[in-house]
């Protein structure tokens, strides 16, 4: 038994040494927050490259959606070359990266689509921050509540698309989904982005969805908590109050479309605890990275609350953020 334990210990040490050596030989390994440069400054994405025995593997978040497994990845002549997952029957985007110090410079070429030609986006990649130890369930000290919407005014927000305003009717904020005159159907409305930025806080929101609508609440502008009518389905990384594409809720707490949802959450560092309609759906869960359509990748900085209003009709009757003022995480 002692011999077996010793062999296991030695094997673990060897595996650790091999892993360390691989990381030293391949600087592309690890997670990367991606930010566009120049004309592509609005681009925000995420990449992970891992060593899988002799091969490379990984996941790629190409601006929107959820991280998807790479179709291929390799290093050739000091350059990382990867292919994203296929989409709509065609090839996925191609990435080519080189290291410059501890940063990665990356060119992402998206193949031609029905609505446009191929396009190359230039980005810089940096490793995500090392978060301090945090606990969303700790006893915290709270400051003065900030009413982002109290049934009276949307002055606390700016519009992502000013030509598609929200309106207030009977104390409810309602997004605009104008009709497409060419096709006679509703088209995308606009997101609301809070003017004030917040770091660690408690958030309370009351909202309801029209049948078939989708939405989301972005915490710090970087982590989307999915809003969708999915009552009766199994929890997944795209469920109501999932960290979209990242972390599934503990339970399905959805109610029928057209009824008022009540969400209360706390974010401290990279930890969240969330209650939806009286059920705990996250219990000090870890945020593993930014989500699709994040406003930026500056994870240690305060960020706004963003309410998604570009994917179907929805209503809010209250949104309140209460900052955490203590420094203990």
Image (cartoon, rainbow, N blue to C red):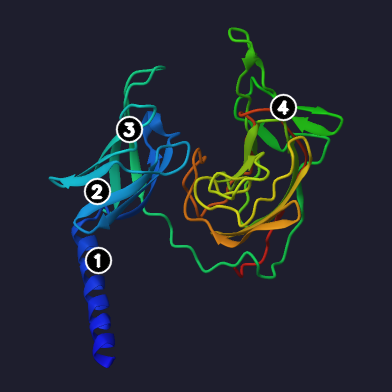
Q: Quadrant of residue 175?
A: top right
Is residue 79 or residue 288 the one in the foreground?
A: 288
State the SS at label 3.
loop
Residue 19, disc: 1
Image quarter where the C terminus lies is: bottom right
Residue at 62% x, 32% y: name it.
191
Give the mark, 3 or 1, whose residue is nearer the N terminus.
1
Residue 92 placement (x, y as % from top left): 32, 33
Q: Is residue 221 above or below residue 248?
A: above
The Cα–Cα distance between marks 1 and 4, rounded to whole angstroms, is: 52 Å
Residue at figure coordinates x 26%, y 72% from the top left: 16
Relative to 235, is 323 on the left or the right? right
Q: Nearer the viewer, mark 2 or mark 3?
A: 3
Using the image, tell me which numbered label, if any, was put on residue 100.
2
Q: Position of residue 23 (x, y in %)?
A: 24, 61
Task: Using the numbered discs, state the Cα–Cα distance from disc 3 to disc 1 in whole angstroms.
Answer: 29 Å
Q: Residue at x 60, y 23 (%)?
A: 188
N-term-proximal mark, 3 vs 4: 3
Counting residues from the N terminus, which is met first, the one under dot 1 or under dot 4?
1
Mark earlier in primary sequence (1, 2): 1
Q: Which residue is mark 3?
A: 92
According to the picture, the residue beneath numbered tag 4 turns out to be 166
Residues packed near mark 1 inside 10 Å, few (<14), some (14 to 19) or many (20 plus)? some
At 47% from the left and 55% from the top, the residue drawn is 288
């Amino acid at each position: 038994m002692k011999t077996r334990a010793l062999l296991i210990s030695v094997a673990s040490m060897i595996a650790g040494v091999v892993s360390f050596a691989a990381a030293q030989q391949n600087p592309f390994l690890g997670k990367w927050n991606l930010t566009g440069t120049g004309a592509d400054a609005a681009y925000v994405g995420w990449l992970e490259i891992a060593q899988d025995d002799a091969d490379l593997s990984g996941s790629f978040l190409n601006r929107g959606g959820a991280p998807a497994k790479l179709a291929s990845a390799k290093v050739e002549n000091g350059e990382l070359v990867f292919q994203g997952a296929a989409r709509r029957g065609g090839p996925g985007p191609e990435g080519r990266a080189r290291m410059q110090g501890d940063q990665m410079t990356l060119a992402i070429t998206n193949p031609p689509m029905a609505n446009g030609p191929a396009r190359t986006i230039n980005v810089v990649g940096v490793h995500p921050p090392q978060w301090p130890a945090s606990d969303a369930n700790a006893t915290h000290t709270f400051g003065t509540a900030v009413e982002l919407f109290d049934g009276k005014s949307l002055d606390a927000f700016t519009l992502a698309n000013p030509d598609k305003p929200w309106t207030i009717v009977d104390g409810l904020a309602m997004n605009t989904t104008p009709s497409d005159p060419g096709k006679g159907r509703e088209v995308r409305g606009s997101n609301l982005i809070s003017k004030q930025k917040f770091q660690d806080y408690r958030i309370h929101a009351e909202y309801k969805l029209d049948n078939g609508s989708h939405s989301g609440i972005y915490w710090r502008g970087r982590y989307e908590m999915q809003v969708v009518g999915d009552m009766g389905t199994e929890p997944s990384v795209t469920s109501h109050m999932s960290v979209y594409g990242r972390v599934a809720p503990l339970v399905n707490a959805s109610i029928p479309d057209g009824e008022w949802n009540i969400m209360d959450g706390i974010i401290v560092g990279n930890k969240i605890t969330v209650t939806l309609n009286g059920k705990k759906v996250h219990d000090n869960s870890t945020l593993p990275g930014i989500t699709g359509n994040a406003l930026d990748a500056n994870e240690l900085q305060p960020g706004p609350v963003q309410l998604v209003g570009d994917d179907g009709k929805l209503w809010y009757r209250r949104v309140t953020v209460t900052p955490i003022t203590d420094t203990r995480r």
